[in-house]
Amino acid sequence: MPFSAPGFIILLSYLLGSIPFGYLLVRTFRGQDIRASGSGNIGATNVARSGSKGLAISTLLLDALKGFLAVQVAFHMNGAYGHFAPQQALGDTRSVFEALRGAYLAGAVAAFCAMLGHMFPVWLRFKGGKGVATAVGAFVAISPRALGVVLLLFLITVAVTRYVSLGSMLGAAVFPFIAWWLSRGVLTSGAMAFIAACSALIIVRHKDNVRRLLAGTENRFR
């Protein structure tokens, strides 16, 4: 299912995702390079390790916002507003449905590109974060009900195991299935492929955490 302005959406989503908020906030307010401390990651978890919970929360929210905005821009450029029908197709049920499918494909592509930008930002020599917060922002725009289920699963996993990384990977793994179940018909095979790719990126970026989990040396949340 084609969608409008694919090149612009891809580039804009990548550039939005590549804004390194964790790096910028720590550099601005603490005069430090977050990449030189903790895990070297620019995400909220490592920012919290720097000793500033306020900056960590800001990083989390801003990283999620850029994923959300990337998807919303893609929706708007293709005539869809959140989960509402495209305006240009009102009055024709079939054309509404087809246009909505195209808009959601655009949103899934935008989500994937925003995550690529966060993980491989051009401004930091392509060394970025793990993409969880950016994915949360993108996924809440694509399927808020599915994300709600995943967040509940994440909280239960962390509460039981105290492993944030395990909760993140488990949530990423199940999101495509829940999103498809709750939004089937709207999410095409192409959109699902990009959503699944987003989840796969998160899991791959947690490869070091997987090694530590298997070795029993992963840090627990306290």
Image (cartoon, rainbow, N blue to C red):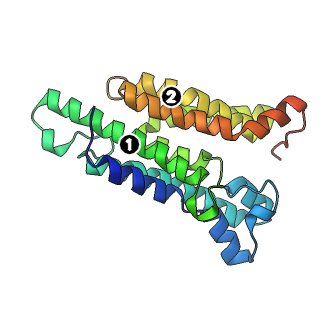
What residue did someone put label 1 on?
Answer: 107
Percent position (x, y) of residue 17?
A: 51, 55
Looking at this view, name the residue that lies furthest to the front.
125
Query: Callout 2: helix, strand or loop?
Result: helix
The circle drawn on residue 176 is: 2
User: At 38% across and 24% down in the image, what residue appears?
Assistant: 189
- Count neighbours of disc 1 (C-alpha within 10 A) and say few if under 14, some if 14 to 19, many if 20 or more: many
Instruction: Using residue 187 as the reference point, say whether residue 102 is left or right of it.
Output: left
* Amino acid, disc 1: Gly
| Viewer-side residue, 45 vs 53 | 45
Whether residue 155 is visible to the viewer of this picture, yes or no, is no
Who's the residue at 74% across and 76% down the image? 30
Residue type at mark 2: give it.
Answer: Pro
What is the distance, in whole Å, between disc 1 and disc 2 at their CAs?
14 Å
Is residue 200 depicted above or below 120 in this figure? above
Quadrant in which the N terminus appears? top left
In this rendering, is residue 38 above or below 140? below
Compared across the picture, whether 26 is left or right of 175 comes to right
Secondary structure beneath disc 1? helix
- Neighbor class of circle 2 (other Cα within 10 Å; few <14, some 14-19, many 20+) is many
Q: Sequence-wise, which precedes: disc 1 or disc 2?
A: 1
Q: Which mark is residue 71?
A: none
What is the quadrant of residue 215 in the picture?
top right
Left or right: residue 126 compared with residue 182: right
Position in image of residue 89 (x %, y %): 14, 38
Q: Where residue 155 sits: x, y (%)?
A: 67, 37
Residue sitting at x 43%, y 36%: 143
Q: Is residue 216 visible?
A: yes
Q: Position of residue 156 (x, y in %)?
A: 69, 32
Q: Residue at x 73, y 61 (%)?
A: 47
Q: Is residue 35 above or below residue 90?
A: below
